[in-house]
Image (cartoon, rainbow, N blue to C red):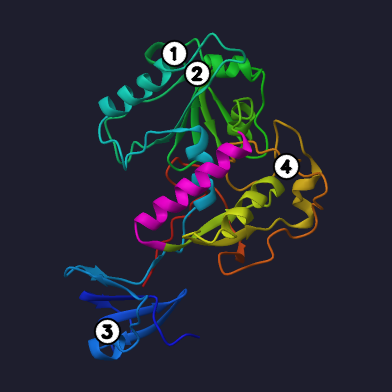
Amino acid sequence: MSSTADVILYGGSIITMDEKNPSAEALAVTGNIITAVGKLDEVFALAGETTKVIYLNQKTLLPGFIEPHTHATALVLVNTAYTNISGYDYHTYNDVNEKMKETIRKLDTETSPLPWALFFGWDPELIPSLPLLSADFLDKEFSSEVPVVVVGQSGHVAWVNRKAFEVANVDDSIENADGGVFVKDDEGHLTGQLFEVYAIERVTSYAPQPTLSDLQTKIKDQWKDFASRGFTTVTEMAYQRNPAFDTLLLKESEQRDCPIRLALYQVVYGPENSIKEEKSSTRSHYQCCPSLLRIDDSMDGSLDQDEPIIEGSDKLWVAGVKVIADGSPHCGTAALLQYRSHI
């Protein structure tokens, strides 16, 4: 290793997270490695003619943040096809309503197949003023001409309009299956509300899907967004293998300027619940969380479905497995037990 640093940072509060030496006056980096943390004279001893010196202007330098429980790849998929209406970004129903109507106005209804108006992040907990949704409400308030889908922030509940049911060939005769619920009124008519994987995907799988190029662009955008917020390591807590999408993740992780490390926690199914039991364009059995996009997994016919694609690197690896009893307390699909202590 060269004794000359590539970069030296100084002139601010440098937090080391080392209990014995919690702060420093300067920090040196050579290649991708921090080579010195300490006093000014010690660190600047590594300065050379080509060393880039950065004055922090009394700002704070922190180690990169690690996000231990998120859905990084799911966020990519959602942001590729869905318009964000999350309570994190919108604070009143008027804001959400305006965003939804603006999005629908921009759709070209003269094209075939029809475009879909897809929204993600409906959150009555953060925005208490949100109205109760139904197929009739979506038809009247937003559109009856194009399919409209509104997915709750938890991802376990959705609402669709009548046009979405029509395009997806869903009518009142449809039955619940595999934990999915098509909510019906007392007379047996669909209300537009959907719970869990089978019901949500039964409708959304008919929506136009983005290209692999679109997904690759969104991966880059999302990784840049994570980095801009100080994250250097993020997780996907419900990773499910998909050769096409895995290939995109691998491609991005191999880029020299990739700013994010991604740790995957794989959902593992028992042999009696193998997802290989049934595959079709409209059903995906035993998934723990809805996949809001259908990704073409036949991009490379030479891929062996049983052979691990992601072998692991310093930027992308399978860190563990996820064992869950799924459902969401936010929309009432989780099984809950009240425990009363006698202590």
| Left or right of 52, for residue 312 | right
Q: Residues within 10 Å of mark 2 (few under 14, many from 20)?
A: many
- Circle 1: residue type: Ser
- Circle 2: residue type: Asn
Q: Name the residue that disc number 3 marks.
A: 22
| Left or right of 255, for residue 225 | left
Task: Please name which of the two marks, 2 or 4, marks the residue nearer to the observer.
Answer: 4
Q: Name the residue that disc number 1 marks.
A: 143
User: Which is nearer the N-term, disc 3 or disc 4?
Assistant: 3
Q: Position of residue 111 (x, y in %)?
A: 57, 12
- Circle 3: residue type: Pro
Q: Name the residue that disc number 2 marks.
A: 161
**Is residue 336 a member of the stretch shown in magenta?**
no
Q: CA distance from mark 2 to mark 4?
A: 29 Å
Q: Residue at x 71, y 55 (%)?
A: 269
Q: CA distance from mark 1 to mark 3?
A: 57 Å
Instruction: List the single residue furthest toward the front.
Output: 49
